[in-house]
Amino acid sequence: MHARVLRYLDEVVSRGSIRQAALHLHVAPSAINRQILDLEAELGAPLFERINKRLRLTPLGEMVLAHVRQTLREHELLRSRIEAVKGVRQGEVTVATTAGLAGSLMPSLVHAFRQQYPGILVRLLDLPVADIVSAVGRGDVDLGLAYDLPDIAAFRILASNDWHIGAVVAPGHVLAAQPSTLLSECLACPLILPAPSMSIRAILDEAFARAAVVVSPVTETTSTALMRRLVMLGTGIAFLNPLDVLEERERGALAWVPLRDGQLPCQTLRLVARARNPLSAAAELMAERIGESLVALFAGVR
């Protein structure tokens, strides 16, 4: 029942900081910090001494850590026995997702999954949204992960959350220091916009139309990787959601500033499976990992 906080505590001690633990576990640093603070509140004493932004275990922390690591060893043994029964040490899972998510969210997520389940083959397909819908509907893939996937009877929605759009700017940009911004405040800058074929572009175009402004982008592209790179090179600013710039924000290469314009819709990210097909044990594990990661990342952004 406490597996998450125990794992977080163990990783923080092993990695030397909350930030490094968060990178390894692919969760938001704030989620780890919150779990540790809650555990300290429950125990009624601190587990760490916080000195010059460094964490050092207190005597109580040393006692708790010994218990945590023994518990985790026993938990891992139990999981290995359960997985042996279920046969999930072997198997495969195929996930269809978009190019943007394949390049931002999925690399560290797949890496962490493979670390835990080395016998499971992970296939990751980079497809347009329409092709993801078709692949899931035909049963060619186990899972589909994309923005604005349709809520239809053929799909079983396994996870869903809404992501706000924001301005992506270089760290030294004047907007980078602001807690939020308006589209109107961005118009003086060169704009790097998603191509008209992308769903996020429709959201932006509707917002521009409501504001009665005409925009002339310096670049249009279907590649979020290219958008990020152009912003880093100083070409202009882009509009994406925080999942699109996970790694760049973590290392300080880009800043994401949420847009506070009224009536600006979010991007709905859905993880879906074919309704009539039960998932394999491997696919269930991958769906669980994706769902947990999205919940943790969403909590961190909020």
Image (cartoon, rainbow, N blue to C red):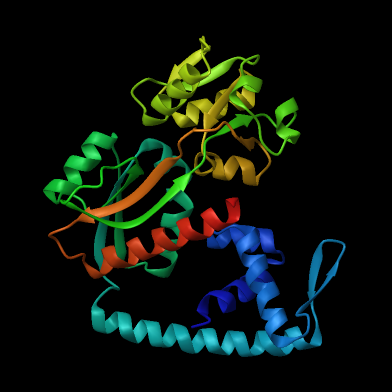
Q: From the top left corner, tell me how far across and down residue 13 is, in percent.
A: 69, 73
Q: Is residue 173 above or below residue 142?
A: above
Residue at image coords 48%, 53%: 108
Residue 88 appearing in the image: yes
Residue 201 is left or right of residue 283, and the answer is right
Residue 173 appearing in the image: no
Residue nearer the viewer, 46 or 264: 264
Residue 272 is left or right of residue 226, and the answer is left
Q: Residue furthest right?
A: 52
Q: Residue 259's quadrant in the figure?
A: top right
Q: Residue 21's quadrant in the figure?
A: bottom right
Residue 277 is left or right of residue 257, and the answer is left
Residue 7 is left or right of residue 252, and the answer is left
Q: Residue 274's quadrant in the figure?
A: bottom left
Q: Is residue 121 above or below residue 186?
A: below
Residue at image coords 24%, 77%: 87
Residue nearer the viewer, 194 or 148: 148
Q: Is residue 167 above or below residue 251?
A: above
Residue at image coords 25%, 61%: 92
Residue nearer the viewer, 274 or 265: 265
Residue at image coords 48%, 31%: 225
Q: From the top left corner, tell me how far across and down residue 90 is, in percent.
A: 26, 70
Q: From the top left corner, tell me how far across and down residue 101 is, in percent.
A: 41, 42
